[in-house]
Amino acid sequence: MKVITETPRLIIREFTLEDAPAVLHFNTPEQVNRYTGDAGVCNTLTDAENIIRNIWLVEYKQYGFGRWAVVVKDTNTVIGFCGFKNETRINAVDIGYRLHPDYWGIGLATEANQACIDYAKKHMDLDIVYADVVDANSGSINVVTKLGMVYHSQYQEGEFNVNRYAISLKTGGSVDNP
C-alpha cells in the first residue's frame, strides 16, 4: 500500500482490496449518497471489492492517481476517500471526497482534500482541478471554498442543480470551461 501524504490527523493512501469492508461501511449510510448520483452502487462486500479492483486500482495504474483512502491515524480506520479522478465526461480532473457521517463536521474533509491539493502542487503535473457539488449540499460547498476553489458554472443533472468549482494549481488564476 502506497502512502500519498499525511496530515496531523490523517493518512492519505492508495486503497487495497483489504479495505473493502471499510468501503462498504462508509458508502452505506443513506445520507452519504444523497447528492452523489450513485446511491445503491455499493450495497455488498462484493460491490466494494469491485469498486476498488475495477475503478481505483485501475486508475492508479492508468493515470497515477485516483480516489485515495482517508485513514484516521489514531485508530488506523479507513473512514472514506478523497483525491483526484480523471473525469472523462468533462475531460478534466475532479477532486472529491466521501466520509462516513460519524466523521462529518470536524474539518476532516477539508484537511484531507487540502493535503491532496498540496501534494498535487509538489508531485503531480496537474493544473486545473474541478469540483462538482449539488447546490443544496452546503457542507461540501464550504469544503471546496475553503480549498480556494471558486464558483465556475452550474448545470442540471437529473433533479439536481450542480455547481462547478475550479482552481488552478499552477497559477491560482481564472479557469475557463472544460
Image (tube, rainbow, N blue to C red):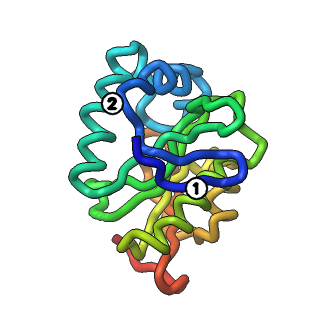
Q: Position of residue 124 (x, y in %)?
A: 39, 69
Q: Which residue is located at x 59 percent, y 38 percent?
A: 71
Q: Quick check: marks 1 and 2 in contact, CB under 8 Å? A: no
Quadrant holding the C terminus: bottom left
Nearest the viewer among 151 and 66 is: 66
Q: Using the image, determine if residue 57 lies above or below residue 152.
A: above
Residue 38 occupies quadrant? top left
Q: Residue furthest right?
A: 106
In the rendered view, does 114 fall on the left or right side of 92? Answer: right
Q: Amino acid at mark 2?
A: Ile
Nearest the viewer among 168 and 116 is: 116
SS category of the residue bearing label 2: helix
Q: Which residue is located at x 42 percent, y 16 percent?
A: 43
Q: Using the image, determine if residue 5 lies above or below residue 77.
A: below
Quadrant holding the N terminus: top left
Q: Amino acid at mark 1?
A: Asn
Nearest the viewer among 131 and 125 is: 125
Query: What crowding class fits label 2: few (fewer than 14 Cα within 10 Å), some (14-19), or many (20 or more)?
Result: some
Q: CA distance from mark 1 to mark 2?
A: 21 Å
Query: What crowding class fits label 1: few (fewer than 14 Cα within 10 Å), some (14-19), or many (20 or more)?
Result: many
Q: Position of residue 172 (x, y in %)?
A: 54, 83
Q: Mark 1 highlights which residue?
A: 113
SS category of the residue bearing label 1: helix
Q: Mark 2 highlights which residue?
A: 51
Q: Using the image, determine if residue 133 lies above or below residue 18.
A: below
Q: Which residue is located at x 70 percent, y 56 percent?
A: 142
Q: Earlier in the sequence, mark 1 or mark 2?
A: 2
